[in-house]
Amino acid sequence: MQRRTGDLKLIQELNRSIILNMIREHGPISRSEIAKKNKISPTTVTAAVNEFIREGLVSEVGTGKSSGGRKPILIRFNPDGGFLISVSVTNSAIKVAELNLQAAIRKKDLFPVHDVKGDELIEFTLRSIEEFIGRLSDLTKCVGISITAPGIVDAAKGVIRYNSKLDLINVPAKTLFESRFGLKTYLDNDVNAMVLAEKKYGKSIHSTNLVYVTIDEGLGTGILVNGSIFRGHHGGAGELGHTSISPDGIPCECGNNGCLENYVHWPAIRSKIEQQVNIGYPSLIRDLLEQEQTPLTPQMFKTAIKQGDPLATSIMEEVASYLSIGIANVINLFNPETVILGGVIAEDNPQLINQIQTAVSKRALHILTEGLEIRTSSFAEDADLIGAAAVLLQDLFQFSLHA
Amino acid sequence: MQRRTGDLKLIQELNRSIILNMIREHGPISRSEIAKKNKISPTTVTAAVNEFIREGLVSEVGTGKSSGGRKPILIRFNPDGGFLISVSVTNSAIKVAELNLQAAIRKKDLFPVHDVKGDELIEFTLRSIEEFIGRLSDLTKCVGISITAPGIVDAAKGVIRYNSKLDLINVPAKTLFESRFGLKTYLDNDVNAMVLAEKKYGKSIHSTNLVYVTIDEGLGTGILVNGSIFRGHHGGAGELGHTSISPDGIPCECGNNGCLENYVHWPAIRSKIEQQVNIGYPSLIRDLLEQEQTPLTPQMFKTAIKQGDPLATSIMEEVASYLSIGIANVINLFNPETVILGGVIAEDNPQLINQIQTAVSKRALHILTEGLEIRTSSFAEDADLIGAAAVLLQDLFQFSLHA
DNA sequence: ATTACTTTTTCCAATGGATTTATTAACTAG
DNA sequence: CTAGTTAATAAATCCATTGGAAAAAGTAAT
């Protein structure tokens, strides 16, 4: 990341980025209004807008209300003036999709994976994308590929540093994909991408400090600081799952005691349920297990909560109580505007969210909980793909002094 | 904070800031080397440097080594080409000092306060500065005043939001000082200022993610993210003292249980010592108290530790153990390059630092502790004044797209 | 309908930064 | 002492923004 120096090209890029973002975020809007709102001369706006029209990025869409003179010509952003390809690597499938420049999904494909790991998985991903791209008519308007993956990711270098489940260690994904497809490629951690999507295209457009927590097989965290993904020194920031909430709590394989993750992730919940069911505790879940003869799923747990099952409810309350300690700690440290809860355990689980909201407001500093929102994610199953798009589009549209 | 638009003035400011910072951080350096290293044309560098010489910001200082042609003329930053006034509001005194443009203290005065609070304290501070300024010969080269205060501070608006001990609530300090002295005034929280000073003028020049923890009457925290002070949404970020380390721990007046602060601040340490001394536990501290007939001081505690006193050592170990949980949590969340420990309890207390280092390396994720440094602060008692200077100088020298 | 006034958009010359291309200055090596 | 090299400056050129004028397209009142 080299710092740019000032020249005419730089001021043009800066101004065009301001103008385009104005149209994207506040369009339809007239040339003269853009000029007034940003204190840029009308001449400059005209030149920039006409260039955008030539490139197909924006279009004129009729006229606005006159305030006593010539009617303004309204300009709007053209989200289908280009597209990008989002790729999400998960434990169960490779998801590939085409999205427009507003992160709306146009086409989507799922390539299930079964026990494919390491280099094989990467090769499978490349072939999946190849197949997907093969069905597209025209690649000239493709602005790039964006990949998200779980685990520790070096976004700047485009390398997947570490993912034990998928057996990925130091995979130079960015280089690999760029040489294969000749398209600019981005890579980021899945939760990082999702939290950025919440700011850019979700319910938190006006927030700049967000914390995103997912509860699944593990506890994932993404943090937005001043509107940008916060990575820390090694890209390892946001390990909320391994913050300790109890000095002599459950020993974790990381070496610490009382790591939050071990109290709230699905394996912990499952084993608690199974333990109680095994010793004969009467519960709706026991009935479900006997009926269906399938292994216990998070879905069953959530169904039981909704139906007021005492066992499920009490376990949920315990999870909420632990989680609230960790979330209150994050709030006291980061002072975010919003905390977003995602992942199978939290999604479609209003009782859990409720419990957390009340517990957190007791534990976190009251100055910091004023106006604080704790809610579920804006996007359901497509959060990862929209997140990937957000990462690419942020780079595409946001002016930066770094080259 | 309005975003700037691109014009000729902007590119000049950007380039001059790059050139001046090059001289500040890598000087003495020749014009041609600046041009090469930053890919700015020699003509531009010459024009900028000559302007700086005219302003007295830099000087030519002889010639460098020739590599086969004309010898380069070396340019160095002129730290005494201007000065600023730092003010630190503490519980015991108003500290006022004159510092040069490299944050070196030139003159310093202490104005002790006894039971002066609220508006009276502000008035006392203003008069103290007036007295200090009265003794200065020439104010034309003064670039501004920078104030640090403990408590919750809105740096952008220049308002002291809340400080219960000094009875300061919503004091518009910036406006107050600017109208009184006609000098551009800055305001920030004391620990925020100190952590910035560590990066700008201390041992962490090359770090961009720092955490600074002070242990005194309370637990203060300052966080540097990507080289800038991290404030969060309300400016309330970094409340490490109120993160919980134990679900059912000591109840805190903030409403939470197990707040770290209550385990490690001086009042907690003092009451533990007194408790043991009162029940007759033999200790060096008991002897000191009987000899001097004065109340217990942190200094006595540290002396006892150094002399291997078992009571002091065991209490210190307990404090280190609790503190390590909190610090490990911060490391897992922020992934900093360095953690700095300050305040009376940590300064000049190598045993404590040692204990914390080993405990943290066990508790924090090992990927994140690789290369991590835990150390004491670079500046002793003047950390607050140098910090204030760092805040002002950062604004003076660092180019920003925000006006 | 006509006229006076507004607002939006565009054209054009002027501005003022940076860069490019000489030119001068100052030194090294043979 | 001369050829070659590097550093610093000067003059000419480049180019994105700007401000003012002009054109385009309206409104409102006579």
Image (cartoon, coloured by chain):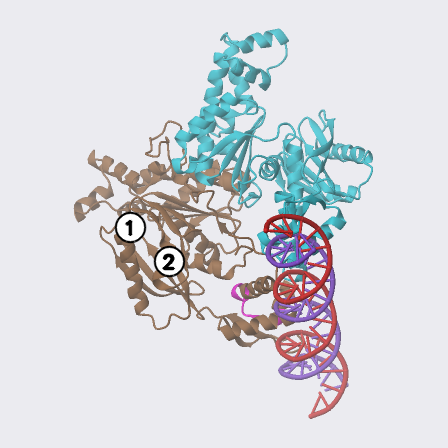
Chain colours: A brown, B cyan, C red, D purple
Q: How many marks do you count on the picture?
A: 2
Quadrant of the image occupied by residue A132? bottom left
Q: Could you say which is closer to the camera, residue C8 or residue A130?
A: A130
Image location (x, y in percent) of residue A354: 41, 44
Q: CA distance from mark 1 to mark 2?
A: 15 Å
Q: Amino acid at mark 1?
A: Asn
Bounds of the magenta segment: A23-33
Which is the main secondary structure of the residues drawn in magenta?
A: helix
Vertical side of B111 occupied by A130: above or below:
below
Q: Amino acid at mark 2?
A: Leu
Give the residue number, with chain letter if any, for mark 1.
A91
Vertical side of A155 occupied by A245: above or below:
above
Image location (x, y in percent) of residue B201: 61, 37
Q: Residue at x 46, y 35 (%)?
A: B372
Image location (x, y in percent) of residue B392: 67, 42
Q: Which label was assigned to residue A182?
A: none
Asked whether residue B335 is drawn in magenta, I would say no
Q: Could you say which is closer to the camera, residue A180 or residue B288?
A: A180
Of callouts 1 and 2, which one flags the residue occurring earlier in the amino acid sequence? 1
Vertical side of B324 occupied by A107: above or below:
below
Q: Residue at x 28, y 42 (%)?
A: A309
Vertical side of A240 occupied by B251: above or below:
above
Q: Secondary structure at mark 1?
A: loop
Subunit bearing disc 2: A
Q: Which label was assigned to residue A385?
A: 2
